[in-house]
Amino acid sequence: MIIDSYAYSSKIKNQVPKNKIFFGTIPLFIVIGANSFSASMIILIIMSIMSLKCTNITFKKYLKLLSLPTGFLIIGVLTIIITKHDYGIPVLFGITIKDSVYGVDKASIIYGSNLMLRALAAVSCMYFMSLTTPMNDVLFTLKKLKISAVIISLMELIYRYIFVLLEEAGKIKTAQASRLGYINLKTSIKSIGTLLAMLFLRTYIRCDNVYAALESRGYDGEFKTIYKEYENDYKWIIATIVLSVILVVISILERRFY
């Protein structure tokens, strides 16, 4: 919901969403496919700067947003860089269990660092699109690109139900907190378990009511929206082409010399 508020208050919210989406997605695909440390670093820096420049988000809050996926990435990367080695093979640090050594060597650290940086670069691309382009504009662009109406309708419904889920979770937690449901660790664990157990049932009922309300208003599987006039700024197309060429060249040079 916080990301959504930044998107609707973005400085470029009225510009053609297709151009902004291309600026975010094409470099994303290049970074994932190129597997280049330098290209990932460049994308992470550029997309972060553009997100800060084109929105009202502060640097501190942007770092907080990045910290969310970073925590999951660290856990995932640790399971990759810690590998099994035969006894006697040198590692930077590790532990010996019977005839094997479980630890980290130089190659695994380089591989893990590259993987984590590539993932963060991809996240920064997604954050740029999320922070500058409202969801309605994204769905509008998908319609213009002739994406299946079923897929778009599912995205719209799922997007709506996310807010239903958050709202129901907030109501249950507020009710529990008013009854001292989080006064200590033991009570908090019990309250969270009750929240999770009740959340699915209450959300299911609420979502069913939302869908019934849609059908009563003539919903036939596709949402009808009014066309919005956008400011067509071709600088995003030019920037996408230039950035894509730079990334490809850097990736080729890195593979050739390193």
Image: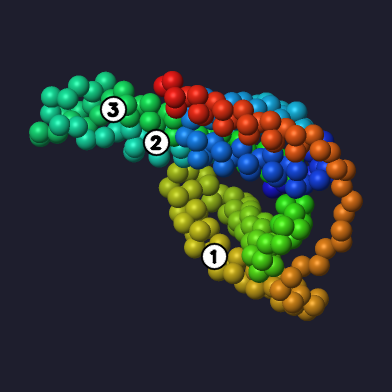
Q: Which disc is residue 79 wearing? A: none
Front-most of residues 242 and 68: 242
Lower position in the chain sequence, tag 3 or tag 2: 2
Q: Which residue is pictured at 51% across the width and 29% down the height?
A: 251
Q: Which disc is residue 200 wearing? A: 1
Q: Which disc is residue 104 wearing? A: 3
SS at badge 1: helix
For the C terminus, the image quarter is top left
Q: Find disc 2 in the rendering and name its residue.
A: 77
Badge 1: residue crowd in 10 Å (few <14, some 14–19, many ≥20): some
Q: Amino acid at mark 1?
A: Phe
Where on the picture, by quarter, is residue 12? top right
Q: Which residue is pictured at 50% across the width and 28% down the height?
A: 252
SS at badge 2: helix
Q: Which residue is pictured at 66% across the width and 31% down the height?
A: 243
Q: Position of residue 165 (x, y in %)?
A: 62, 59
Front-most of residues 172 and 208: 208
Q: Is residue 70 left or right of residue 4?
A: left
Lower position in the chain sequence, tag 1 or tag 3: 3
Q: Position of residue 256 (x, y in %)?
A: 44, 24
